Amino acid sequence: MTTAVITGGFGYAGGRIARHLLEAGTDVRISTRRREQDIPKWARDNVRWDADLEKLSDGADCLIHLAAPNEIACAADPEAAIAATVGLTERALGAARAAGIPRFIYMSTVHVYGPMQGLIDENTAPDPGHPYAVAHLQSEHAVQAAAENIDAVVLRLSNGFGAPADNGTDRWSLLVNDLCRQAIRDHRLQLSSNGLQHRDFLPLSDVAAAVRHFVEGAPCPHGFRMFNLSSGRAMRVIDMAALIRARAEAMLGVDVCLETADGGPPPPATKLVVDNRRLLESGFQPNANAAAEIDGMLRFCIDTCMHPA
């Protein structure tokens, strides 16, 4: 049985990754400072958790590092958040080295590239503007430096979307989550822009499956590999909103209106393409159904917004 340690395993993407690995038969250990009463039900009888990352790492095959301040915390106090992000990454790398873990997977972000426009592949020069992206790029450098002694994989995640593993995470600032909540709560979608900007949206089902792909992949000792974890197909924000509207209307049996803000940026001169050919060449093919992922998020909103615990 493969043993994987996850930092941030009770977070938004981390929870979905942890549950996916559990369902695949992986021995999952999660580094957390949560109290026992705050551990979600799905993990209580299935996961080993502890604040001591070094102890959790003993005998593990892989360490998956996601723990980091989110983009809101980074914007509020950039200097502290960047230091915290890099510090958490260095601690995770240290735990992996001390335990002799052969593989380290770091979840970064495509926003290290800067503006989301044109063709972006792994050779595109990073140009981070937001402190969240700066923090992740600095962490990438730490991971790359450690690759002399460990098999290191960096996944630059595009716009992941979908329901969290439980209601213990608060990620309503994410576009798709916010629009799904609006649809359920208000029967109305209000975009803060004209919706003409492009984004590469990736279902969390694919995010979790991709991480499992690299957890179970053949080791490549003392190597460093970087992948865009993306769908490879960008769509306009307004088209994503229209899909959410259609799924909500089908689920609720009511009309849902869609409104955009006046003005805003013009459509991009070149369509966004977050190239994922390197990911495909590794043997992983994103194939999750976007509509099914949205339906899952809408059901989550019904449970949490209309029938709160």
Image (cartoon, grey):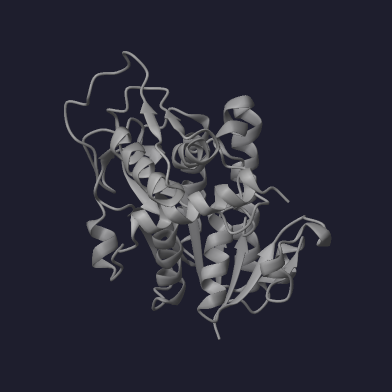
Considering only vertical position in the picture, is 218 above or below 282?
A: below
Considering only vertical position in the picture, is 135 above or below 88?
A: above
> In this view of the protein, which residue sits in the foreground, 53 or 303?
303
Residue 241 visible in this rendered orientation of the protein: yes
> Which residue sits furthest bottom?
1
Residue 227 visible in this rendered orientation of the protein: no
> Which residue sits furthest front?
253
**Residue at coordinates 66% horizontally, 49% vertically from top-left?**
307
Is residue 167 shown left or right of residue 138?
A: right
In which quadrant of the rendered image does the N terminus lie?
Answer: bottom right
Q: Give percent across and percent down for residue 124.
A: 27, 41
> In this view of the protein, which residue sits in the foreground, 67 or 286?
286
**Residue at coordinates 42% horizontally, 59% vertically from top-left?**
207
Q: Give percent across and percent down for residue 53.
A: 71, 63
Q: Give percent across and percent down for residue 189.
A: 43, 31
**Residue at coordinates 59% horizontally, 44% vertically from top-left?**
86
The quarter of the picture where residue 220 lies is bottom left
Considering only vertical position in the picture, is 11 above or below 222?
A: above
> Which residue sits furthest top?
263
Q: Give percent across and percent down for residue 231.
A: 29, 53
